[in-house]
């Protein structure tokens, strides 16, 4: 079993300055960015909708922004999603569990291993296969135990990089976007396809509150509840909440929109993502009574990060045609993970 180690994630730079010169303040806010079309579009948008004299003015309570997590502000190419890596470790390497995993869970973990080590294509609809396997793999853990388990794995060195753990793999330019939006009265939410409690554990270090995280969900029960329905059972003072093996929702595509509607209750005016799983969220945002905008980040930097540049360029063209602003990691980010982080080849232990 991994020993839980709470890592110190990067500290977000302040949005405030003692200097009254606004040009200096803006420069400090975005010192991880190059001058680019996407950043200019974001700044022009925010300046417009926060200006009380603008016909596009949006009151603070309606300034809602939604962010996908993996590949949007957290690295996802080491060599695959954090939650995929975690399941692979849990099922195939963790001595406390690997001999207890059901066969279908083992198959899902092996599919991930074959994909990252040998390039074997994942099965069709693997996102659901993984979600169902993950629900089973962590069933029986209390929420506190699962949080510690995630943070312990996050404290390990990120595969494919030096100078960074998994729990520190935030895109520094996107942290500056969080700061900028907060300084301008926006409330932002993480809306991810990854497990809600994995997301909460990862973003805690950058100050995102757990009630602003939406993700994949499994059914929870009280520790002494048994099979009795929650509507009939009264939880005791000493009981804990426990994960079950029952998947409630995989938060992808249109499911993201449904969850935003149910949990936030307002249509976002800004949306940030990186893949087709975010298009529904973007389109929901753009169909808004307020002026709105959507941004897609493309992983086109194969020098500082692990990326398929040819695929990324194709996606960039597709996203522009869809009416989204495109953020290029190669061209727009002055740094990705910050100083001291270097891309290296992936390594795998036997």
Image (tube, helix red, strand yellow):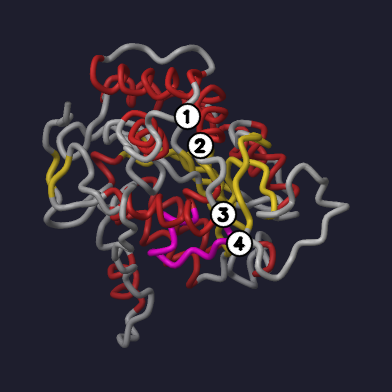
Element at label 1? helix
Residue 19 image position (x, y, % from top left): 30, 85
Which of the marked residues, 3 or 2, is nearer the chain's N terminus? Answer: 3
297 w.r.t. 9: above or below:
above
Q: Residue at x 28, y 20 (%)?
A: 310
Residue 200 image position (x, y, % from top left): 49, 55
- Label 1: how many Cα within 10 Å (few below 14, some 14–19, many 20+): many
Residue 234 falls left or right of residue 125: right
- Label 2: how many Cα within 10 Å (few below 14, some 14–19, many 20+): many
Q: Which residues are magenta?
A: 200-212
94 w.r.t. 49: above or below:
above
Q: Nearer the viewer, residue 112 or 293?
A: 112
Of the 4 image quadrants, the one containing the C terminus is top left
Which of the marked residues, 4 or 2, is nearer the chain's N terminus? Answer: 4
The residue labelled by disc 1 is 319
- Label 4: how many Cα within 10 Å (few below 14, some 14–19, many 20+): few
């Amino acid at each position: 079993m991994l020993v839980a180690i709470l890592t110190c994630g990067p500290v977000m730079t302040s949005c405030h300055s003692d200097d009254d010169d606004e040009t200096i303040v803006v420069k400090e806010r975005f010192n991880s960015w190059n001058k680019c079309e996407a950043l200019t579009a974001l700044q022009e948008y925010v300046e417009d909708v926060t200006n009380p004299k603008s016909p596009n003015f949006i009151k603070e309570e309606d300034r809602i922004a939604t962010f996908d997590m993996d590949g949007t502000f957290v690295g996802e190419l080491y060599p695959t999603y954090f939650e995929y890596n975690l399941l692979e470790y849990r099922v195939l390497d963790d001595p406390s569990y690997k001999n207890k995993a059901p066969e279908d869970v083992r198959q899902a973990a092996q599919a991930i291993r074959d994909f990252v080590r040998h390039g074997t294509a994942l099965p069709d609809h693997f996102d659901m296969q993984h979600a169902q396997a993950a629900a089973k793999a962590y069933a029986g853990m209390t929420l506190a135990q699962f949080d510690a388990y995630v943070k312990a794995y996050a404290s390990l060195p990120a595969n494919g990089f030096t100078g960074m753990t998994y729990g520190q793999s935030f895109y520094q330019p996107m942290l500056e976007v969080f700061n900028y939006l907060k300084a301008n009265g926006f409330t932002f939410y993480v809306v991810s396809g990854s497990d809600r409690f994995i997301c909460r554990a990862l973003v805690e270090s950058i100050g995102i509150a757990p009630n602003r995280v939406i993700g994949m969900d499994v059914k929870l029960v009280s520790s002494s509840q048994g099979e009795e329905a929650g509507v009939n059972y009264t939880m005791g003072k000493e009981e804990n909440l426990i994960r079950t093996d029952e998947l409630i929702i995989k938060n992808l595509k249109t499911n993201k929109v449904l969850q935003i509607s149910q949990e936030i209750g307002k249509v976002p005016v800004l949306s940030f993502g990186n893949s087709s799983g975010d298009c529904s969220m973007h389109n929901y945002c753009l169909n808004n009574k307020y002026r709105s905008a959507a941004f897609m980040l493309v992983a086109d930097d194969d020098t500082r990060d692990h990326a398929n540049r040819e695929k990324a360029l194709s996606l960039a063209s597709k996203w522009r045609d869809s009416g989204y602003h495109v953020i290029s990691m190669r061209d727009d980010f002055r740094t990705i993970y910050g100083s001291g982080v270097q891309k290296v080849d992936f390594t795998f232990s036997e």
